[in-house]
Amino acid sequence: MPKLFGFSIDDSDKKADSVVAPVPQNNEDGVDYFIQSGFYGQYVDIEGVYKTEYDLIKRYREMALHPEADNAIEDVVNEAIVSDLYDSPIEIELSNVNASDGLKDKIRNEFRHLKEIMDFDKKSHEIFRNWYIDGRLFYMKVIDVKRPQDGIQELRYIDPMKMKYVRQEKKKKNQRGNGLIDVNNLRDITKEAYPEVEEYYIYTPKPNYPMGVYSPQATGKSKSIKIAKDSITYVTSGLFDRNKGTCLSYLHKAIKALNQLRMIEDSLVIYRLSRAPERRIFYIDVGNLPKVKAEQYLKEVMSRYRNKLTYNAQTGEVRDDRKFMSMMEDFWLPRREGGRGTEISTLPGGQNLGELSDIEYFQKKLYRALGVPESRIASEGGFNLGRSSEILRDELKFSKFVGRLRKRFGNMFNDMLRTQLILKNIITPEDWDTLSDHIQYDFLYDNQFAELKESEMMNERLGLAATVEPYLGKYYSTEYLRKKVLRQTDVEIEEIDAQIQQEIKDGILPDPNSVDPITGEPLEGGGGDLGDIPVEDDLESQGAVTDAQFGNDTKKAEI
């Protein structure tokens, strides 16, 4: 095997030698390619669907060229990747990450850098479509080996037909020829006693293996290159054939349905071409003529009445095509004396040629196999935006299916972001293990059915809250109303309360303490208290009041 190409990120958190297990660590994807004697990638398929990954990917790409399958694929890709004039199809979400604001800003900047070198905003549709069809996606992370702290310089797409993920078991010194380990001769149970798996990738620049057999020892143009695991970003569909250890595409379930649809369409065309025209039967009376003369007479009659003169509009020639006979021409049959004489009858053409129920059935079957609602098949009916109660359950299932695809596809950015942050010394591998569980990716959403569902649920909750409001303080509390009726979480309640207080402070919302709860009109004096109480002037401060003045004021008051 050639020397390992690329780079590797060492994990400093290695387990102790005493932490051992007889079973090697399984790949989380469930795909294992154990090499034996430099030969791998070969399978025996009894059903004849595929023999190698090479054949499998080729079949998926051929399926994508079929119009019906292409329409279903485009429906999935258009729902998953929404292109907008101003917004990016995907953004990173770090609200649940327990880190400082400075670290979050650095992570966001590096994520934007990765999108720029991938040109993801422009090529997002093609990237997601290739991943959906092939069932796997490979990107090589190119770095400056002299300055690895500069991070990823380029991300190069690799054709899955040229790349192979390999897990190889290392041979131990105590391992027998049959692959078993003799633990009886071992004094201590250590890691040396149990299998160790090496993971890497095999890249073949020009695969010329019709049977899909990779040969790392090969020479010439098909010589393979061994690449380190950390140098490649590898994301799968999440579907696997565990019997063969092969990654599958979401198109795999539709192979049979698409073949059946093709067969039905081809047979329908042949049937209509052969049975559509009407044919005539000529019964020619040959009397008592001998067999030879009867056949001769029949041919003379045929040549007399058959008009096979054709005109070629391109050359202006008139040709005689009497010597040619097709299956759709008339029939000429002799009839002996005693019969009904010469007769001409007509055979009707095929019946019910306009029925397409069988074609429509297999089209629906194809869409069901691909997980796309049957209502999305192109028809005369337009798109109807009604109430959420009118939305089919298939659309809701389809929305959840697209959400799972997005979640799986986001693993690509996880791997790239991990390499970028560790190379630039922003975080350590141990920190990434803690942060990665809380990093989410926000895809631009454009599913009208989900919006209708959310708005309908919000209207129902607000209506129920208005019904419960008169009973607040008697049967229900405000906290119960917000949690059980409006379905607000503790975090949402805290955020909403903080936003309300801030808007009141900024003057966007009126202060509830300054508004009459009965009339809804603002109180006089404003403020949150009882208002400013008017204070009478202090007369003593303005001078003493004489008795004469007091008497005069009293008399005026009495009058």
Image: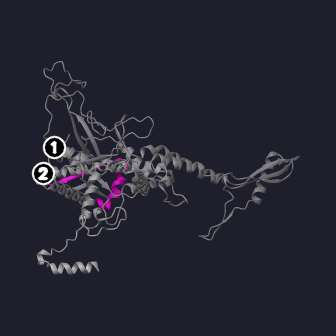
| Residue 483 in sight | yes
Residue wearing tag 2: 425
Report if residue 144 lies within the magenta region.
yes
The picture places residue 157, in percent across and down from the top left corner, at 28, 54
Q: Dots 2 and 1: beta carbons under 8 Å?
A: no
Q: Residue furthest top?
A: 184
- Amino acid type of disc 1? Glu
The one nearer the camera, 349 or 87, is 87
Give the extent of the magenta segment.
119-145
- Amino acid type of disc 2? Asn
- The disc label shown at residue 430, or none: 1
| Residue 206 in sight | no
- The disc label shown at residue 248, or none: none
Q: Is residue 206 left or right of residue 453?
A: left
The picture places residue 121, in percent across and down from the top left corner, at 30, 61
Q: Is residue 515 left or right of residue 346?
A: left
Residue at x-position 39% and y-position 39%: 51
The one nearer the camera, 70 or 43, is 70
The figure's colour scheme reads one colour
Q: Calculate the distance from the C-alpha at mark 2 to the C-alpha at mark 1.
A: 12 Å
